[in-house]
Each structure stands twice: as structure tokens, then as C-alpha cells.
Image: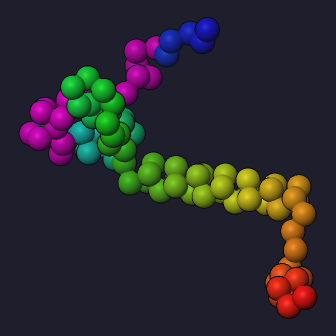
């Protein structure tokens, strides 16, 4: 089993009821101090407040990961091109 993260690396946790009045401070911490906040609903994680730069980086990483997976699948599969599809439909 993996060791738990040190407390200083754990994100802040905020119930939705508190977020109604504290979302601005959570957003500022996320953007200026790179401190995410996990929003919870009845104790269950619901969403994470992260800074815009972090979100942009995560989105780029996800996109690159998806492209890598698509390229891997393309190399490992038997693909047919458009002309072959048309020819098979016409026969």
C-alpha cells in the first residue's frame, strides 16, 4: 500500500455550503499559490478548484495522452482507407 501524502501536499477540502461564501478565496489560492481545493457534497468529492494555468496544462496533457493512445491504436490495428471502403460497398 502506498504511503499517505504529507499534510502539506494534500489539497484543501471545502463543503459546498462553505464554497458559497468562500469560493473567491479558494480561486485566489488556486491561481496565485497553486493550491487546489476539493469541493465536497455531503462529504463526497464533487469538483476541484484549480488555477486557470493548471487547468490549461492538465487539458493539454489529457489531449496529448488521447492522441498518443489513438496513434498507438492506429499502428496496432488493421486500417483500411476510404477507397477500400467505397470499393467494398460497390462490390
Q: Is residue 51 magenta?
A: no
Judged by its main secondary structure, the magenta piece is helix
Location of residue 25 with respect to 65 vertically, above or below: above
- The quadrant in which residue 16 appears is top left
Which residue sits at x=87%, y=74%?
80
Location of residue 24 with respect to 56 vertically, above or below: above
Q: Is residue 51 left or right of residue 19?
A: right
Residue 76 placement (x, y as % from top left): 88, 55
Question: Farthest left residue?
Answer: 21
Judging depth in this view, the residue of 43 and 9 nearest the camera is: 43
Question: Farthest bottom residue?
Answer: 90
Location of residue 87 with respect to 77 vertically, above or below: below
- The colour scheme is rainbow
**In the rendered view of the protein, which quadrant contains the C terminus?**
bottom right
Which residue sits at x=44%, y=51%?
55
Judging depth in this view, the residue of 34 and 84 nearest the camera is: 84
- The quadrant in which residue 20 appears is top left
Judging depth in this view, the residue of 2 and 81 nearest the camera is: 81
- The quadrant in which residue 52 appears is bottom left
Q: Is residue 75 left or right of residue 37?
A: right
Location of residue 40 with respect to 5 vertically, above or below: below
Q: Is residue 79 visible?
A: yes
Residue 17 placement (x, y as % from top left): 12, 33
Magenta region: which residues? 6-24
Q: Is residue 8 magenta?
A: yes
Residue 27 placement (x, y as % from top left): 26, 45
Q: Is residue 33 visible?
A: no
Which residue sits at x=27%, y=34%?
39
Which residue sits at x=83%, y=82%?
85
Amino acid at each position: 500500500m502506498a504511503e499517505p501524502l504529507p499534510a502539506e501536499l494534500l489539497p484543501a477540502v471545502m463543503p459546498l455550503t462553505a464554497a458559497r461564501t468562500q469560493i473567491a478565496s479558494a480561486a485566489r489560492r488556486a491561481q496565485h499559490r497553486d493550491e487546489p481545493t476539493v469541493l465536497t457534497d455531503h462529504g463526497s468529492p464533487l469538483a476541484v478548484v484549480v488555477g486557470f494555468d493548471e487547468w490549461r496544462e492538465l487539458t493539454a496533457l489529457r489531449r496529448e495522452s488521447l492522441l498518443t493512445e489513438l496513434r498507438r491504436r492506429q499502428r496496432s490495428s488493421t486500417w483500411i482507407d476510404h477507397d477500400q471502403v467505397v470499393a467494398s460497398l460497390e462490390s
